[in-house]
Image (spheres, rainbow, N blue to C red):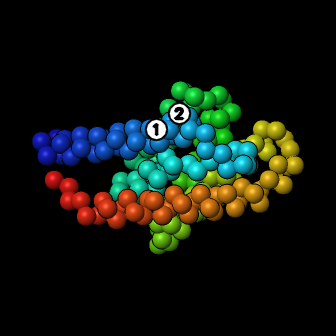
């Protein structure tokens, strides 16, 4: 392996580590701050700003690593097995949907909205399967609206970050 290739790999690894650390910090802040939307289980998901930015700035495997390593580490620090299942289910569905929408050339905000909605659908589906109850589907309209609103806010923030990063020339 040449020196420049190993430096490039080291640089990419450091970038992924920084994205994961930033996503974890955002997750932690959101966990300790009492920001209540008045709807059980609904939160802004500020760590998803990092995932959306990663989707546009990193390779897909690296973006998946940022998303799933953050979910796993936050679970280890603060969660239980059900929180891992719900977060992972929402995270997988959200990321797949965002990847597809990005390839379809949706805007950053559109990609984020799809991610927010699908994250809630993934979590609700996991809960319905675990609890073996379709009664949870009555909660779907609320979660769809919440995903739309939070996805818009996260997407707008990610767009601003991406625009600022586009002015940054890596050395």
Asked whether, in this view, residue 112 is left or right of residue 7, the answer is right
Asked whether, in this view, residue 154 is left or right of residue 93, the answer is left
Q: How far apart are marks 2 and 1 (CA)?
A: 7 Å
Element at label 1: helix
Q: In this figure, which residue is indicated by the disc labeled 1? A: 24
**Disc 2: CA contacts within 10 A as few (<14), some (14-19) or many (>=20):** many
What residue do we see at 55% from left, 34% from top? Answer: 32
Closer to the camera, 10 or 147?
Answer: 147
Which x, y percent locates residue 15?
Answer: 31, 44
Q: In this view, does 7 lie above or below 108?
A: above
Q: Is residue 12 above or below residue 157?
A: above
Upstream in sequence: badge 2 or badge 1: 1
State which quadrant residue 97 falls in. bottom right
Closer to the camera, 122 or 112?
Answer: 112
Question: Does the image show residue 116?
Answer: yes
Q: In this figure, which residue is indicated by the disc labeled 2? A: 74
Question: Does the image show residue 101?
Answer: no
Q: In this view, does 59 lie above or below 104?
A: above
Asked whether, in this view, residue 3 is left or right of residue 104, the answer is left
Which x, y percent locates residue 68?
Answer: 50, 41
State which quadrant residue 79 falls in. top right
What residue do we see at 25% from left, 64% from top? Answer: 167
Asked whether, in this view, residue 152 is left or right of residue 14, the answer is right
State which quadrant residue 169 falls in. bottom left
Number of the label disc, if any, that sits on residue 64: none
CB of mark 2 within 8 Å of CB of mark 1? yes
What residue do we see at 73% from left, 45% from top? Answer: 40
What residue do we see at 46% from left, 56% from top? Answer: 52
Closer to the camera, 111 or 7?
Answer: 111
**Disc 1: CA contacts within 10 A as few (<14), some (14-19) or many (>=20):** many
Quarter occupied by the N terminus: top left
Element at label 2: helix
């Amino acid at each position: 392996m040449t020196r420049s290739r190993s430096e490039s790999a080291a640089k990419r690894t450091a970038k992924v580590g920084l994205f994961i650390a930033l996503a974890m910090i955002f997750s932690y802040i959101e966990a300790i701050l009492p920001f209540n939307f008045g709807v059980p289980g609904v939160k802004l998901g500020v760590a998803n700003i990092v995932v959306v930015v990663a989707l546009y700035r990193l390779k897909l495997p690296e973006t998946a690593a940022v998303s799933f390593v953050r979910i796993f580490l936050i679970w280890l620090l603060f969660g239980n097995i059900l929180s891992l299942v719900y977060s992972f289910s929402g995270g997988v569905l959200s990321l797949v949907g965002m990847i597809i929408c990005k390839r379809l050339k949706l805007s950053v905000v559109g990609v984020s909205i799809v991610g927010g909605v699908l994250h809630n659908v993934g979590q609700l589906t996991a809960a319905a399967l675990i609890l073996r109850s379709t009664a949870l589907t009555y909660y779907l309209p609320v979660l769809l609206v919440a995903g739309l609103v939070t996805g818009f806010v996260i997407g707008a923030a990610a767009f601003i970050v991406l625009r600022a990063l586009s002015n940054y020339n890596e050395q």
